[in-house]
Amino acid sequence: MFAAGLSAPDIQWAQLVPLLVLLGGACVLLLSTLAGSLPRWVAPSLTIATTFAALVVSAVRWNELYYNKGSYLVADAIAEDRFSMFATIVILVAVVCAALLMSSHHDNANGDALENYALLLTSAIGAIVMVAANNLIVMFLGLEILSLSLYLMAASDRRREQSQEAGLKYFILGGFASAFLLYGIALVYGATGAISISGISERLAGELTTGNKDALLLIGIGLILVGLGFKVSAAPFQVWTPDVYEGAPTSVTSYMASAGKVAAFAALLRLFMSGLTTRVDDWRPVIWVLAALTIFVGSTMAVVQTNVKRMLAYSSISHAGFVLVGVEAASHRGSDGLASSMAYLAIYTMLVMGSFAILVTVAGQEDSATSLDSFKGLAQRRPILALAFSALLFAQAGVPFTSGFVAKFGVIKSAVEAESYAIAVVAMVGAVIGAFLYLRIMVSMWMEDPTNTEKVTIPRPAGVVIAASVAFALIVGFFPGLLLDAAKLVRFVPL
């Protein structure tokens, strides 16, 4: 009788095709284990083909959304707009790169390849749900789908104890972060009586919350910031990042640092810029502090590391701080902080994928040679690889005529236009400090003698990622309008 009283929402299947394609690919990968042992190329090829299909559909939907404002789907739980499509395209590009990197160093001693690639697709489903969620519970479900997949992927290298440790640390600390987020969602619901982001915006715009309800709302917003701050590696919630990034397989680390960060930042931007705009004076100072602290911690801690993987982990924290500068700028009326933040995430995704692709190549099949000593004299052992890494490091440092300069200049420019001069100065100082890290790696590659004279072999899949990343860094550096014009079109529903 209870079931008979329930009414199912209308489901717009055509708009959910990217998610359905990814789900179908994951199911096919898991069911293919019934066919027995398959050639190694089958799993990555099927994963890449599935992702490309979803990418094509997403690109078509992006083009169609150029002419209309988008809409809410599945009982207003999912928002299909230019914001979600832009983030979805970036995530799917990261999935393709991660699949290529996973195929570069997988062997029979390192678990079941089919399971790892299936987890890659399910994590992409969770990430896409996060960036498109208009319902806080749906956003949480997307976060959990993404996180659970990443926990298993981080612990998937059965040859190394560090991988098991990384998966366990990520699982325990991620569980705490999810609890904070869920408790924050409950308090926001208690204060507003709405669970959808659009509903929260309408309730807060239509009435002034006072007394206990106002306290519930502020505490809820704070707890949500803690939960999402963990996922984006914002200080002081970044303590898990270096250990997990170092212990996880390098290909998985590249995916966590790119797609995972894009999904978390997109969820944060949608909630705070679309649902909590009327309380901007309450949460903007917190974002300011988080941005300054994250840049400082990431930049200063990176320069004292001796492991390149940990260096890139702290660099990832610093980059999260720069994105938060864009988020703080976006909170000011009339600022282009939203566009600069999304452009930064797209650029950072390609830079981090290329950097970790080079790390995959140098680390070897055992995925263990990640210390700074392993990069000494790389220019003598493999000049083309050292040149490519130098280009990517220059881009991450924000050197002109690279995509990294476009990204950092964009968020700092947004902060200045919003008259947030102090955080703009903090960002510029952090960029100068962080440049020492990248120069340190380049000095090791070009000016020191190699400790290992063995020639570095570049796997073909990793070579594709490296070439694409370097090309992207230079093309966007010389022609920034190709990306910035698209980022400026990013909008929420309704326009």
Image: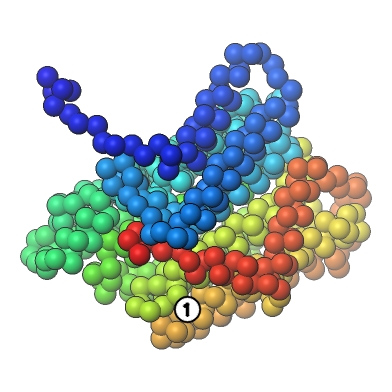
Question: Along the horizontal axis of the image, is 209 left or right of 54?
Answer: left
Tell me the quarter of the picture where residue 47 sits.
top right
The residue pinned by badge 1 equals 414
Three-letter amino acid code of the residue under disc 1 = Ser
Task: Please name whichever residue, 391 or 176, is drawn nearer the observer in this view of the structure.
Answer: 391
Q: Residue at x 82, y 56 (%)?
A: 385
Question: Left of 65 or right of it: where is 109?
Answer: right
- Image coordinates of residue 466 in percent, x first then y, are 75, 53
Q: Position of residue 356 (x, y in %)?
A: 68, 52
On the question of residue 162 being in view, the answer is no
Q: Quarter holding the C terminus?
A: bottom left
Residue 413 against residue 180 in the figure, above or below: below
The structure's colour scheme is rainbow
Residue in the image at 16% along x and 56% along y = 192
Q: Position of residue 411 (x, y in %)?
A: 51, 74
In this rendering, the answer to whether 427 lies above or below 274 is: below
Q: Nearer the viewer, residue 241 or 90?
A: 90
Q: Check the picture and name the quadrant holding the N terminus.
A: top left
